[in-house]
Image (spheres, rainbow, N blue to C red):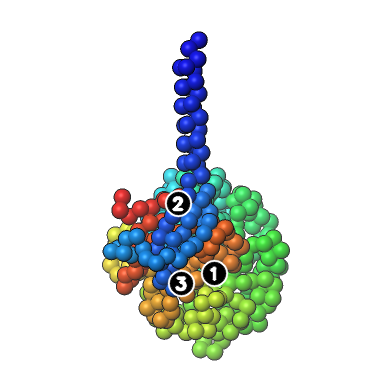
Amino acid sequence: MNYSFTLKIQQLIVFFLLLTMNIAFAQTKIEGLLYLNKKPVSVEIKDGKIVSVQQIAKLSNESHPVYIAPGLIDNQVNGFAGVSFCLAGGELNKEGIQKVTSELWKKGVTTYFPTLTTNSQEVLFKNFATLAKSKNDEALNGSIAGYHLEGPYISPEDGYRGAHPLKFVRKPDWKEFMELYEASGRNILTVTIAPELDGAMEFIRKCTTMGITVAIGHHNASKAIVDQAVLNGARIATHLGNGCANMINRHNNPLWSQLANNQLMASIICDGFHLRDEEIAVFYKVKGPEKTIITSDVTSFATLPPGEYKNEDGETIELTKEGMLRYPAQNVLYGSASPISIGVIHIMNVTGCTLGDAIQMASTNPAKLYGLTDRGTIAPGKRADLILFELSDSELVIKKTYVNGKLVYNASK
């Protein structure tokens, strides 16, 4: 036996093992202007976690400075880039879910909740089961935290129902809901419900006991009912100011009671269409950056060219050249075509809030509300979900997106 040759082989093996270990435990440093104070920082990442955040004298590349912030968290994504989570007939698939995820990374969204809206039990069951099978796919890199069920337990009244199909609207049914919950792999994290429905209060209590965050929305509840829902565990108003009739009583309507209840957070759609600027300004003054969440309510029509389309039920949906998504049959909006990267800038323009406040509403607050304690801020020990971006007049211009410390999007490539 050639012992010299064997020794060299062993030395090569050890060398490659050490090289592999160094790669596995390699540390990455990311620089940017911290979103909270615009000061240059270096964020060190190891094994998908933030190890340290150090202020530095200047950025290595001062000619192209970028901001750094925690990745955005969107609690209401109905679909994106031509893919809907409400597709009937088993059409939702793993490839579609991966497409939504990778396209959202380009918009700075590192965590999102696929949202299923009012539909038949069969469709909801199938799509939750499909989502459950794909949730932990390596290609998604942990970007799906859980799911949002918006409906079918909502108001049947026109306007308050929004674009949800009346034929599938129904009263809360716990047995039915548990079938969906099990199909989802027990990953339904939040439910939007109309609290005035028969059985709603018991439903809210049961969800709260199970750790499911209850939102009230698409409702016409009185102040007494709203307050009772909050006492029973409801914590947030879904897209406040929307899912509401076009004509309402100036005194007796669901807006005042939700704004007045200090225990209730509010999610708002800041795409420039769902709410007037003055509404956003007032909602922000009442709830403040601590109790406001920026959501998108984005749909499969986002990123598509303007024109007329058909929804899952074959009804006409119009996407205007300005970016508004309309449901002509009821003269109401049909979700949004704008990601929350637009909402972050729009709320800053409307309210004068800081970038730090806007990121808090688009990342930190939803992380707290839904118990995602490993993300939503930039601090040692947190998951390295980070975005590097520039500011424009209309949206965050994402340059790089990291999820779990992995670079998942690079605008320069």
Task: Please state the horizontal and vertical placement of residue 192, each as a whole percent of the image.
Answer: 57, 66
Which residue bears the numbered disc 3?
Answer: 36
Task: Please state the horizontal and vertical placement of residue 111, each as a whole percent of the image.
Answer: 50, 58
**Mark number, residue 365:** 1
Tag 1: amino acid: Asn
Which residue bears the numbered disc 2?
Answer: 28
Residue at 49% of width from left, 41% of height from top? Answer: 22
Please tell me whether mark 3 sits on a helix, a strand or a loop: loop
Quarter of the image for residue 34 reads bottom left
Q: Is residue 314 left or right of residue 203?
A: left
Q: Are marks 3 and 2 in contact (CB under 8 Å)?
A: no
Circle nearer the N terminus (1, 2): 2
Front label number (1 vs 3): 3
Quarter of the image for residue 411 reads bottom left
Task: Please state the horizontal and vertical placement of residue 160, each as a whole percent of the image.
Answer: 51, 74
Residue at 47% of width from left, 17% of height from top? Answer: 4
Task: Please state the horizontal and vertical placement of residue 365, each as a whole percent of the image.
Answer: 54, 69
Tag 3: amino acid: Leu
